Structures are given as structure tokens and as C-alpha cells.
Image: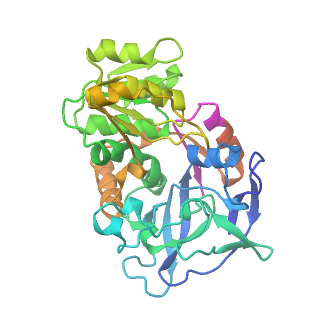
Amino acid sequence: MRASVLFEQRKPLQVEELELEPPRAGEVCVRMAASGVCHSCLHAADGSWQGVPVPIVLGDEGAGVVESVGPGVQDVKVGDHVVLSWAPTCGRCHYCVIGRPNLCEKRLPGRGLLPDGTTRMSLGGKPVYHYGHVATYASRTVVAESSAIPIARDMPLDRAALVGCSVMTGVGAVINTAAVPAGASMAVFGVGGVGLNVVQGGALVAAHPIIAVDVKTSKLDHARGLGATHGVDASREDPVAAIRAITKRGADFTFVAVGDARAMAQAVDALAPGGTCVLIGVPATGATVPMDPRPIVTGERVIRGCSYGSARTREDLPRLVTLYQAGKLRIDELINRRYGLDEANEAFRALAAGELARGIIVF
């Protein structure tokens, strides 16, 4: 299989021919159709996140067709069209049983390994690690059965790829994590791939107003096209003051879809009394956010994290596909560039420069 491999952080990716073992018990092999280009992969490549094992095949957002299955696989069969989930689940641990499978205790985050603690890829006899348990920057990949979510065959796989991370994370942050009610005010800090889907989630639940905050005017225009009612250019004005001027008392919900500590502090400051700030983006390793706790206590404000939109993947991912097919969720408008596998470095350059809503690698 061909894959784009990161051999060293802060160095360009290289396309290599890797050996791929067949799936073991409870695993499936997927022929990839498309992979989204995520900021998390950029952070792994550019050194923002430390401790990334190398060599590693990046990519945590993709879709494809099942080619083969290992022993014991029950819910996925050869020929199924699947969205890949970077959060495999065991179905038996404390968090899986209480309905929070995105926090599954059996996962091995950040180690580049499948749930059994090994890899299926190698180069010259040496192991190559799997990013996000799925490694989607590859023509084929082996994943745990719970990471391959069957979807309708008439769903275009290049659009389905984005459901696996950015759409699920953004829409899920609104619907699952925050449970935003109709008419509540929202502000979204950072309207890239995930933030645009937070905006879409707000539109789905009839939040109002939906305020997009970014430092690039083009991104604010894109957010308006997906449901934002207002745009705030944080490079030109104080976003906290702007949000308070629009909402009168502050936002009921703020979402931070960028790994920026300053944006996190501003999102907390922009809350109305009783409001909730949802942190989605992950900043660079070691980053901290200065905070005055008094307004949190006296105003009963809430700060909470959001991992993968609090996804229940086997339920939520097919539901998002259904919403797209019904015209309620817009994914085509998110994709503004397509790349070949050998163009992954250019995709990262464009992402870092703020040129992408969502770029995808197509196979």
C-alpha cells in the first residue's frame, strides 16, 4: 500500500510503499477513497504536539470500502462503505457502558497503535505507526471493527470522509456536548473545518444569533454561508466587546474550535451569566490559559471540554450521513481543494496559511 509517511516532526512527509499485514481478529482492511486534511495532523507534523511516535502514517478522517475482515468480525462485511472513526470502542468499559464511548478506556491515545497495542504497517521490517488508530493518508488501512462505521452506499465517499472527524466534532459539540436549545445565542471562535461545522450545528438546532469569530475575512464569509448570522474579525476588533454588543449580556454558549490559548480566554470572557464555554481545539503542548475564576463562580459559568463531539459513532455518523442526504447538512460547501496523496505537504501548507475550509486527499 502507498502512504504518506512522517519520518520526523518539522520535516516534509514522504510517499512510501509500505507492507500492510492482513486484518487480525476483530479488524477490517479498508480501501481508502478519501481522507480529510485535519489541523490535528498538521500539529503532529509541525511539532506543535510533542511525543508523536515516528515513522507514522497521518490522517484521522476518511472513508472507503471494506476489502477484507479478520476472524470474529460481525457487524462489518466485505463491500461495505464505511466512515472511519479515530475513536475505537470496546463496548464493555465504564465509559462505553454509560453511553460515553468516545472516552473508551481501552483506547491508546497518542501511541500510534491499534487497540491490541501493535501496528499493521511496516517499512523494511520496522513498524510504522497509525495516527488516530486509522491512518487515512494511505491507499489501504487496517482498523478495529469499531472504527469502521457502515453507511449508505449512495453516500459519496469523498463527502463521507469529513463526517468521520470535522463534521462529527463540530456538529456533535453543539448537539451532544452542549445540548444547545433553540433560540440560545452562540459564538464560535475559529471557523475552519471544525468551526464551520459548529456553525452548522447551531443552525440545525435554531440557535440565534450565531456569531463567527476569526482573523480571516474569507472564513467569516464562508461561515455566513453556512448559517452564521454575524461575523467578527478578531484582528480588527475586540471579539468579547463585539459579542456583548450583539447579545447584550454575552453569549449563552461559546465554542473554541482552534487550539489557541488567547481565543480560549476570550471565549470564557464572552459568556453570559450561566453560559457554557466548550473547548474543542487542542493547543500546543504545554500551553496554559490565564483565567480569573471569580466571574466563573459568581456567574455560574461553565467551562467544559469536547472530544469528538461526544460521539456515539455507530449512531451518530450514519445519522449525519442521513442529514446530508436530506439536505439538512452541507458538506460539499466545506471542501474547497482536492489533493493527490503526493500533495499532502502542499495541503498542510495551505491549511497552515488559512486557505482551506477543508482540503481532502482523494485516492
- The location of residue 221, given as percent across then percent down, is 44, 23
Span shown in magenta = 350-363
- What residue is at 60 percent from the left and 51 percent from the top? 361
- What residue is at 49 percent from the left and 73 percent from the top? 144
Q: Depth check: give the residue in front, 151 or 5.
A: 5
Residue 165 visible in the current orientation = yes
- What residue is at 37 percent from the left and 49 percent from the top? 309
Q: Depth check: give the residue in front, 273 or 7.
A: 273
Q: As drawn, which residue projects farthest toward the right?
A: 124
Quadrant assignment for the C terminus: bottom right
Q: As drawn, which residue projects farthest toward the bottom?
A: 71
- The location of residue 84, given as percent across then percent down, is 47, 62
Q: Where 67 sits versus 128, above or below?
A: below
Quadrant assignment for the N terminus: bottom right
- What residue is at 32 percent from the left and 57 percent from the top? 316
Q: Is residue 352 magenta?
A: yes
- The location of residue 123, given as percent across then percent down, is 77, 71
- The location of residue 321, given as percent across then percent down, is 34, 54
Residue 252 visible in the current orientation = no
Q: Where 324 sits versus 203, above or below?
A: below
Q: Where 90 sits versus 350, above or below?
A: below
